[in-house]
């Protein structure tokens, strides 16, 4: 019921408020005109100097109303410009954040998993880590870090006598992937029969997958 009430609750924007004020001023002007018409019989018996004073007063009121209308219209236009500018700025910020996450130039936080690969027999090779990366990507991982390397579109692995290099940086066992995405989907993809986990275990590795409500990826790539 609370959600329904919130949906039904009127939302008043600054533009709507100013528009309402414009209607109020116009209504006041119409009401004043009606009252003026109702007093026509009185004006018919008024002296000339009284009529001149009444006309002058009505002229001043009309000018003030026109001035108020102009002010309100300018205020409304300004609020609409501000709203449009604020919306565009917010959209630009959101796009910049999205691009930064995709390019790996911004840190990220979100639900995901930690994939830990222990390699006591030194049987894990660059190809195995590449397979792990591709499995995570295929399972919908949005942001990935391996060791202290932020994964990018051109991330590559090379075998080294001391371990495996990722984008030129040496990684040593245990190899640790942090991936932000749907934990269930990624865990299921890694554990499919004959998939990554079985392949790594066949190479003598021990694999541990931990689901986390919040994974913090702090490594970033140079712009």
Image (spheres, rainbow, N blue to C red):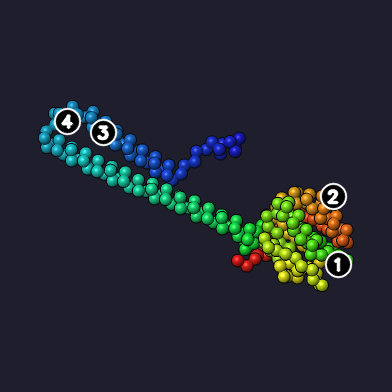
Circle nearer the N terminus (4, 2): 4
Identify the residue at image location x=19%, y=29%: 40
In 3D space, how far apart are the residues under numbered discs 1 and 3 (Cα atoms)? 94 Å
Residue under label 2: 193
Q: Are marks 3 and 4 in contact (CB under 8 Å)?
A: no
Query: From where the camera sits, is residue 148 visible?
Result: no
Q: Give coordinates of residue 129: x percent, y percent.
A: 78, 61
Query: From where the camera sits, is residue 116 visible?
Result: yes
In 3D space, how far apart are the residues under numbered discs 2 and 3 (Cα atoms)? 84 Å
- Relative to 65, is 9 on the left or the right? right
Residue 174 marker: none
Residue under label 4: 43
Give SS at disc 3. helix
Circle nearer the N terminus (1, 3): 3
Residue under label 1: 122
| Residue most extreme to the top | 41
Circle nearer the N terminus (4, 1): 4
Give SS at disc 1. loop
Depicted 139 relative to depicted 157: above or below: above
Identify the residue at image location x=28%, y=43%: 66
Give SS at disc 4. helix
């Amino acid at each position: 019921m609370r959600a329904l009430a919130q949906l039904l609750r009127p939302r008043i924007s600054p533009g709507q408020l100013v528009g309402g004020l414009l209607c109020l001023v116009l209504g006041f002007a119409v009401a004043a005109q009606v009252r003026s018409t109702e007093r026509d019989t009185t004006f018919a018996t008024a002296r000339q100097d009284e009529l001149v004073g009444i006309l002058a007063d009505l002229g001043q009121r009309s000018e003030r109303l026109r001035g108020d209308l102009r002010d309100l219209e300018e205020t409304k236009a300004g609020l609409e410009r501000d709203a449009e500018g604020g919306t565009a700025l917010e959209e630009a910020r959101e796009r910049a954040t999205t691009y930064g996450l995709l390019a790996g130039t911004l840190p990220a936080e979100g639900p995901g998993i930690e994939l830990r690969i222990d390699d006591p027999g030194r049987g894990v090779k660059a190809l195995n880590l590449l397979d792990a990366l591709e499995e995570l990507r295929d399972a919908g991982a949005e942001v990935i870090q391996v060791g202290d390397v932020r994964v990018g579109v051109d991330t590559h692995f090379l075998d080294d006598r001391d371990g495996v290099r990722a984008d030129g940086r040496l990684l040593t066992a245990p190899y640790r992937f942090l991936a932000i995405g749907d934990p269930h989907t990624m865990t299921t993809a890694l554990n499919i029969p004959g998939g990554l986990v079985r392949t790594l275990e066949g190479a003598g590795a021990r694999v541990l997958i931990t689901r986390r409500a919040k994974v913090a990826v702090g490594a970033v790539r140079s712009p």
